[in-house]
Image (cartoon, grey):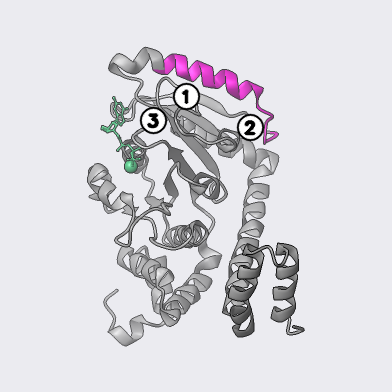
Amino acid sequence: MSEPAAREEAPEAYRDAIRGGDRRAVARAITLLESTRPDRAALGQAILELLVPETGAALRVGITGPPGVGKSTFIESLGLELLERGQRVAVLAVDPSSPVTGGSILGDKTRMELLARRSEAFIRPSPSGGSLGGVAHRTRETMLLCEAAGYDVVLVETVGIGQSEVSVASMVDFFLVLLLPGGGDELQGIKKGVMELADCLVVNKADGPTEAVAERTRVDYANALELLRPSWRAWKPRALKISAREGQGIVQVWETVLAHRAALEGSGEMEERRRHQARAWMWSLLDESLQHAFREHPEVAREIPRLEAEVAASKATPAAAARRLMAVFRGGG
Ligand SMILES: Nc1nc2c(ncn2[C@@H]2O[C@H](COP(=O)(O)OP(=O)(O)OP(=O)(O)O)[C@@H](O)[C@H]2O)c(=O)[nH]1
Ligand SMILES: [Mg+2]
């Protein structure tokens, strides 16, 4: 955007620039959304609201896996393949552990060197600081901005720590779990429940000395998937093996993503999935702002330390203290 500064602050100017695919405008709008200054954040929200009608067209893919499994290498490889196919690609991250300076994807830009250099690709580190919920909300909003800017595919990466996989799974159309050759999911630090969320399990590093064990691991996972109760009428999760480093199997992964989309669109489940996600997101935002309003309420804030102390000293039950705080909040206390 090259308009004078004052005009740039109008949400409409951002909207037009983002619609036109201006990457700098996208980046600046994301920074606004992430801002802790209420007026900046409000401008970000105003921009987002103007753009909502233009969102939803991208294919959203979530990628998780244990540290060192090859997520960045895979995303670079898949991203380049998609660019070859004429698609524009955005890469985002959810990393609640990331320090103030931004997430690991920033360092990853060096690992996604080829992708980062391409003008059809947009790479954005995880929003930093705050709760997982907050970080995930920002990433979701960033995803919408990227869609409005015309990115065809949004890849959302998260390292499997805490609950971040679950929140990424709840914002994407396709959820992919990358695994290492050998070692069960628990050994790899994949938590219970994450397997059930996967639309596809992908064993990476199927090359050189680890190729044979990668195939055995793939078969083991394929068998394990057979035992899971299917989440979808039209889709049975698959187990694949790839070498992200050699670029082997990447096309097959993408064809699986496309087959999944076709299947779920055919059964109406894709629309269902997105509707469900949008409702859940609304409630999660509401939970967040209610919590905030509650803690900011002056009388509640005054009561909290006293009641916490009473609960800790077993002088009041948690239930009674919670009831008391609610009564204060409602103005009846
Ligand atoms: N042999 C082999 N090595 C690979 C492959 N993919 C990635 N690696 C190597 O595995 C290491 C980790 O790769 P990354 O892509 O950084 O893994 P990551 O999952 O992004 O790691 P974190 O971001 O630290 O969680 C690097 O040394 C890569 O070169 C592969 O397909 N085969
Ligand atoms: Mg990485």
> The disc labelled 3 sits on which kind of residue?
Ile
Percent coordinates x, y for residue 186 in the rendering: 50, 29
Percent coordinates x, y for residue 168 in the rendering: 51, 48
Q: Is residue 301 among what the camera can see? A: yes
Q: Which residue is mark 2?
A: 235
Badge 3 residue CB within 8 Å of ligand 1? no
Q: Which mark is residue 240?
A: 1
Give above or below for 269 relative to 229. Answer: below
> Of marks 3 and 2, which one's residue comes earlier in the chain?
2
Give yes or no for residue 216 being in the magenta stretch: yes
Q: Residue at x 52, y 59 (%)?
A: 133
Q: Secondary structure at mark 1?
A: strand
Q: Secondary structure at mark 3?
A: helix
| CA gap, disc 3 and disc 2 | 20 Å
Q: Secondary structure at mark 2?
A: loop
| CA gap, disc 1 and disc 3 | 10 Å
> The disc labelled 1 sits on which kind of residue?
Leu
* Magenta residue span: 214-233
Mainly helix, strand or loop, the magenta region?
Answer: helix
Q: Which mark is residue 274?
A: none
Side of 78 where 170 appears, left or right = right
From the viewer's side, name the closer residue of 328 and 161. 328
Give above or below for 301 relative to 205. Answer: below
